[in-house]
Amino acid sequence: MAAFDALVERFHRPVYRFCWRLLRSPDAEDLAQDTFVRAFVHFERFDPERPVLPWLIAIARRLCLDVLRRRKVMARVETMPASDPPAPGPEIQAAQREQLENLERALDDLDEGPKEAIVLFHVEGMSYRDIAAALEVPMGTVMTWLHRGRAQLRNALQDALIP
Amino acid sequence: MSRQPDETGQLTSLLRALPAPAPSAEFLAAARRRYLEAIEARDRRHVLIGLVAALVGLAVMATLLGSGEGPVALVAWLAEAAANLARWTTAGSVVIALVPLPVWASVVLGSAVAALSLVLIARTPALRVVK
């Protein structure tokens, strides 16, 4: 049980963030917990030569895609408040906030693959190799998704800036 | 020259600044509870499978004892079943070898088309009667 606790303690944030980015709903927490349960119930399938996080992300991704398929909402789930927004202090400029909102919308509008690659690379700081393992695609596909995702995000941000 | 890495770094900073909820404080406790439940369910399943296997074994033993023929009859029956299986497998492979490949291909293709047609028909919404 200590090993389970240690694994959850160490990786629950990135797994949860990933689930939340895909689902944008409270189901994310359930699925993140399910991810750890499945990982441990089928621990014999884990290759100790490989890093743990991509393996967990691969499990989480399959669970999330199952939920999305069940909901028949592949593109976008109605947005729920991301979190309690930080208290608007003087340091938070309106323009910056608007930029983040645009970026969030653009990220939600990305296709599954580019979105997952962008989140894992930019937010979780994973390597191409680990992302490829997590998403179960070749490394070239990861690079293509990243390139496409970045281009779309950049365009969305520029469109927002240019009225 | 350094525009690309700058842009990537800027994008990374912006993406990391996006608000995202944190997992609840009960995350670990809930995950642990679900893990224990899953382990219990797996153990129950194993016990159930063991019980079913034992029951099947008992039933086989009871049948053998009831028939009064003993293990020799069982071995003979198994040998006959294996011989039958081998005979049918050989016959099947002879038929497969005798029929030319284009015939098999057309049979497979025809079956696939028929199955696909049935699926499409089944998925077509019911026609409404026009008055």
Image (cartoon, grey):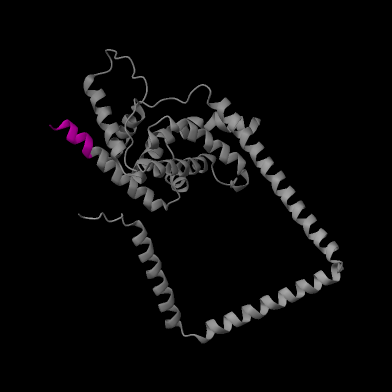
Q: Is residue A143 above or below residue B119?
A: above
Residue in view at x 33 percent, y 30 percent: B13
Quick check: can you spot residue B1?
no
Q: Is residue B107 above or below residue A127?
A: below
Taking the view exactly as shown, the residue that stands out farthest to the left is A163
- Predominant secondary structure, magenta span: helix
Q: Is residue A20 above or below residue A146?
A: above
Q: How many numbered circles does the render carry?
A: 0
Q: Position of residue B62 (x, y in %)?
A: 82, 59
Q: Is residue A35 left or right of residue A74?
A: right
Question: Which corner quadrant of the image does residue B61 belong to?
Answer: bottom right
Q: Is residue A41 left or right of residue A128?
A: right
Q: Is residue B127 left or right of residue A57?
A: left
Question: Which corner quadrant of the image does residue B128 belong to?
Answer: bottom left
Quick check: can you spot residue A159?
yes
Closer to the camera in the image, A63 or B89: B89
Closer to the camera in the image, B84 or A128: B84
Q: Is residue A19 left or right of residue A81?
A: right
Q: Is residue A154 above or below residue B112?
A: above
Residue in view at x 58 percent, y 81 percent: B93
Q: Position of residue A106 (x, y in %)?
A: 27, 36
The quadrant of the rendering that contains the N terminus of chain B is top left
Q: Position of residue A94 (x, y in %)?
A: 22, 20
Taking the view exactly as shown, the residue that stands out farthest to the front is B131
Question: Which corner quadrant of the image does residue B45 belong to?
Answer: top right
Taking the view exactly as shown, the residue that stands out farthest to the top is A90
Closer to the camera in the image, A163 or B94: B94
Span highlighted in magenta in the image? A155-163
Residue in view at x 61 percent, y 37 percent: B38
Q: Is residue A73 magenta?
A: no
The quadrant of the rendering that contains the C terminus of chain B is bottom left
